[in-house]
Image: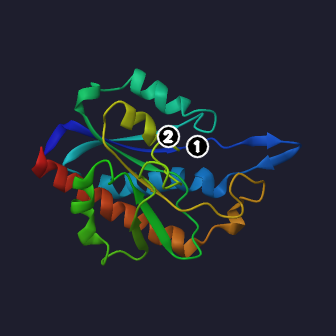
């Protein structure tokens, strides 16, 4: 094991707040990712990882990734010891049962590592949303993982495509697909476990 090397598992807990008198609860964006952090932490408490894991719930993502920026400016461990950021942002809803892994365009080794789990997990796991424009819909800098990427810390981002309630006051708990959300978290646990074990052999 490599307890002196770190993987940061992150999700932002802020949302839009109140706009024009309406409360934006942000159930999928991003209470879902924040709740997933706790489930993943519980799993690894019971199944100790090879590396040390830092679970980080960031504030102020919606106003410019400010929480993540503060973290990399003031890391709790030496920044050189952070091998990877696994970021979760919107993981509880998909009409197509699809969860995306973004980042492997920039870090192809992670596609090699994670491809074998695609057939084993309970959601449709897709790679994408990370190629530069003009291909459109590049998520590389759309959430907190972008801050790590700029610091040359590799990232893997898990998320769903935008839905009709994205950044609307209708992004409520009632709209969460509980079965998909549960399966999504199980998938992220498998992926995190796989990355943890594989990074150990690569470093």
**Residue 112's quadrant in the figure?**
bottom left
Q: Where's residue 166, x and y in %?
A: 68, 56
* Callout 1 secondary element: loop
Colouring mode (rainbow / by chain / secondary structure / one colour):
rainbow
Q: CA distance from mark 1 to mark 2?
A: 6 Å
Mark 1 neighbour density, 10 Å: few (under 14) some (14–19) many (20 or more): many
N-terminal of the pair, mark 1 or mark 2, is 1
Residue shown at 17%/55% (left/top)? 198
Is 164 positioned to the left or the right of 47 in the image?
right
Is 92 positioned to the left or the right of 183 in the image?
right
Is residue 47 in view? no
Q: Is residue 13 above or below residue 88?
A: above
Mark 2 neighbour density, 10 Å: few (under 14) some (14–19) many (20 or more): some
Residues at badges 1 and 2 in contact (C-beta under 8 Å)? Answer: yes
Q: Where's residue 26, x and y in %?
A: 67, 52
The residue at the far front in this view is 134
Residue shown at 61%/52% (left/top)? 29
Query: Which residue is under mark 2?
Result: 57
Query: Which residue is under mark 1?
Result: 13
Is residue 197 in view? yes
Q: Where's residue 171, x and y in %?
A: 71, 58
Q: Is residue 122 above or below residue 53?
A: below
Residue shown at 65%/64% (left/top)? 163
The residue at the far right in this view is 21
């Amino acid at each position: 094991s490599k307890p002196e090397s770190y993987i940061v598992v992150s999700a932002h807990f802020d949302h839009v707040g109140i706009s024009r008198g309406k409360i934006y609860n942000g159930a999928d964006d991003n209470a879902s990712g924040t709740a997933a952090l706790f489930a993943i932490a519980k799993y690894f408490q019971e199944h100790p990882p090879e590396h040390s894991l830092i679970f980080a719930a960031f504030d102020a993502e919606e106003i410019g990734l400010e929480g993540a920026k503060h973290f990399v400016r003031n890391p709790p461990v030496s920044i050189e010891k952070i091998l990877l950021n696994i970021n979760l942002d919107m993981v509880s809803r998909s009409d197509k049962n699809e969860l995306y892994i973004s980042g492997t365009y920039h870090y192809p080794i992670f596609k090699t590592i994670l491809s074998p789990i695609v057939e084993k997990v309970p959601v449709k796991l897709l790679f994408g949303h990370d190629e530069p424009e003009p291909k459109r819909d590049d998520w590389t800098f759309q959430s907190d993982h972008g801050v790590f990427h700029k610091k040359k810390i590799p990232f893997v981002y898990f998320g769903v495509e935008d839905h009709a309630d994205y950044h609307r006051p209708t992004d409520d708990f009632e709209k969460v697909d509980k079965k998909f959300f549960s399966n999504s978290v199980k998938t992220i646990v498998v992926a995190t476990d796989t990355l943890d074990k594989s990074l150990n052999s690569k470093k």
